[in-house]
């Protein structure tokens, strides 16, 4: 899964709660920051992003035809590969 320059090698989707967890790295989470969309970015102890928690991706995909993510830089990017991530491993 990818958004802008961020590539997420580890993705887990929880269908009952409609929440997607995407990790950028194996670094330990030290802080969290909520976006205007309600998603939550996680950061390590020096402020580098470690992942994102995407709230209601299925609902957003059905409503908008895509899931957009506000990056830590403030830019909004389409979350690519979200449909495959929600289907899970083949």
Image (cartoon, helix red, strand yellow):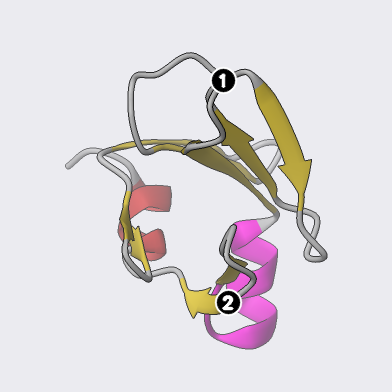
Position of residue 31 measured from the top left corner of the image (x, y, whole percent): 69, 26
Residue 24 is labelled as none
Instruction: Give the quarter of the figure containing the C terminus.
Output: top left
Position of residue 59 measured from the top left corner of the image (x, y, whole percent): 69, 66
Q: Residue furthest bottom?
A: 64
Residue 80 belongs to magenta span: no
User: Horizontally, is 36 left or right of 60 in the view?
Assistant: right
Q: Name the residue under label 2.
A: 75
- SS class, disc 2: loop
Compared with 79, 49 (above or below) is above
Compared with 56, 5 (above or below) is below
Residue 60: which quarter of the image? bottom right
| Observer-nearest of 23 and 11 | 23
Over which residues does the magenta segment extend? Answer: 57-67
- Which class describes the residues within 10 Å of circle 2: few (<14), some (14-19), or many (20+)? few
Residue 43: which quarter of the image? top right
Tell me what residue is drawn at x 55 percent, y 43 percent.
52
Q: Distance between the residues labelled 1 and 2?
A: 23 Å
User: Horizontally, is 88 left or right of 76 in the view?
Assistant: left
Compared with 38, 31 (above or below) is above
Mark closest to the chain's N terminus, 1 or 2 = 1
Position of residue 66 measured from the top left corner of the image (x, y, whole percent): 52, 80
Q: Mark 1 points at which residue?
A: 45
Position of residue 24 measured from the top left corner of the image (x, y, whole percent): 36, 38
| Observer-nearest of 14 and 38 | 38
Tell me what residue is drawn at x 72 percent, y 33 percent.
32
Tell me what residue is drawn at x 53 percent, y 27 percent.
46
Compared with 81, 64 (above or below) is below
User: Horizontally, is 41 left or right of 3 in the view?
Assistant: right
Instruction: Give the quarter of the figure containing the N terminus.
Output: bottom left
- SS class, disc 1: loop
């Amino acid at each position: 899964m990818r958004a802008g320059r961020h590539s997420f090698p580890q993705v887990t989707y929880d269908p009952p709660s409609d929440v997607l967890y995407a990790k950028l790295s194996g670094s330990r989470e030290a802080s969290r920051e909520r976006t205007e969309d309600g998603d939550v970015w996680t950061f390590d102890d020096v402020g580098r992003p470690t992942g994102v928690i995407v709230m209601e991706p299925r609902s957003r995909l059905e409503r908008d035809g895509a899931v957009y993510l506000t990056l830590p830089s403030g830019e909004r990017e389409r979350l690519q590969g979200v449909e495959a991530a929600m289907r899970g491993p083949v």
